Amino acid sequence: MANWDKRYAETTDRLFGEKPNEYVRQVLARSDFSAKTALCIADGDGRNGTWLAKQGLKVTAIDISAVATEQALAHDKARGVTVERIVADIAEWVPEPGRTWDCAFMIYLQCEADVRNRAATLASALLNPGGWFIAEGFAPNDSGRGSLGPGMPDLLYERDQLLDAVGDLQVIEALNGWIQLDEGTKHQGTGWILRLLARRSKVAVREASQFGSKAI
Ligand SMILES: C[S@@+](CC[C@H](N)C(=O)[O-])C[C@H]1O[C@@H](n2cnc3c(N)ncnc32)[C@H](O)[C@@H]1O
């Protein structure tokens, strides 16, 4: 398990830059996107959560690192926004009963596959009707070309596993590709990544028996 507290404590700058992740920005710019509340899984020192709050969303952010969360709170304050920030391991975190969100982000969560897949399943289950799941992370690459990102395969966003994890959401795009990253000191260079955008149905699906009739 990486020592994220140590990594964040070693810098006063945002490790992954000041600006939001480009895919987060692109999804918010979609003409069909709307959301009032956002859940940010592994928000680190807060670049995405702070920016989403600046866009007017009510944001809840989770990260395992207490140091990153302290830094994120300071950035929120400096930018005049309030974000609900929770220090928790996403392997175990569960929200209070009844809480749901309009969108959930899982941007470069760096952890083992079982934890990552659990996080995606949990986030999907916590979406309101019409809600959005947005993920970006380094992906397995067998081209022989070097990529930014952790060397351990278990830490990479494996497409089919994540598609399974989001279950009944409608997949809008699940794209693997090379991108040029320019995010803080840690994401500098070319990376093979996965971008996943999926959406919960706008209509709650109910069994025919709930209407007192037989399914046909
Ligand atoms: C590469 S950083 C990305 C941070 C942020 N999402 C961003 O893009 O700026 C990975 C983050 O995952 C967090 N993390 C790793 N394992 C976690 C876990 N089990 N639960 C919650 N957060 C975790 C780390 O603390 C770290 O902030």
Image (spheres, grey):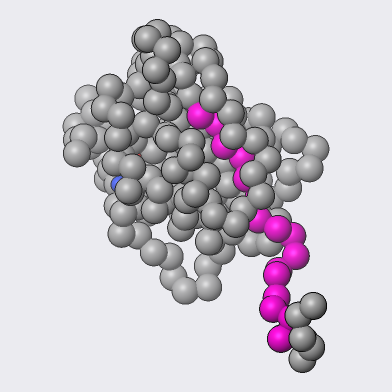
Which residue appears at 48% of the width and 24% of the height? 193
Please indicate, yes or no, whether residue 37 appears anywhere in the rendered image: no
Q: Nearer the viewer, residue 75 or 124?
A: 124
Which residue appears at 52% of the width and 44% of the height? 163
Q: Decide: is 171 above or below 142.
A: below
- Residue at the extreme front of the image, as rendered: 216
Which residue appears at 45% of the width and 30% of the height? 137
* Quadrant of residue 6 within the rendered picture: top left
* Quadrant of residue 10 within the rendered picture: top left
- Is 91 magenta? The answer is no
Q: Decide: is 179 above or below 56.
A: above
Left or right of 50, for residue 15: left
Q: Quadrant of ligand 1?
A: top left
The image shows a total of numbered marks equal to 0
Q: Nearer the viewer, residue 127 or 160?
A: 160
Range of magenta residues = 194-210
- Residue at the extreme bottom of the image, as rendered: 212
Q: Quadrant of the C terminus?
A: bottom right
* Quadrant of residue 142 within the rendered picture: top left
Left or right of 89, for residue 97: right
- Is 198 magenta? The answer is yes
Measured from the top left, where is residue 120 in percent x and y? 46, 50
Q: Quadrant of the N terminus?
A: top left
Please indicate, yes or no, whether residue 123 appears anywhere in the rendered image: yes
Q: Nearer the viewer, residue 64 or 113?
A: 113
Measured from the top left, where is residue 164 in percent x and y? 49, 49
Measured from the top left, where is residue 189 in percent x and y? 43, 9
Q: Decide: is 181 above or below 25.
A: above
Measured from the top left, where is residue 187 in percent x and y? 40, 18
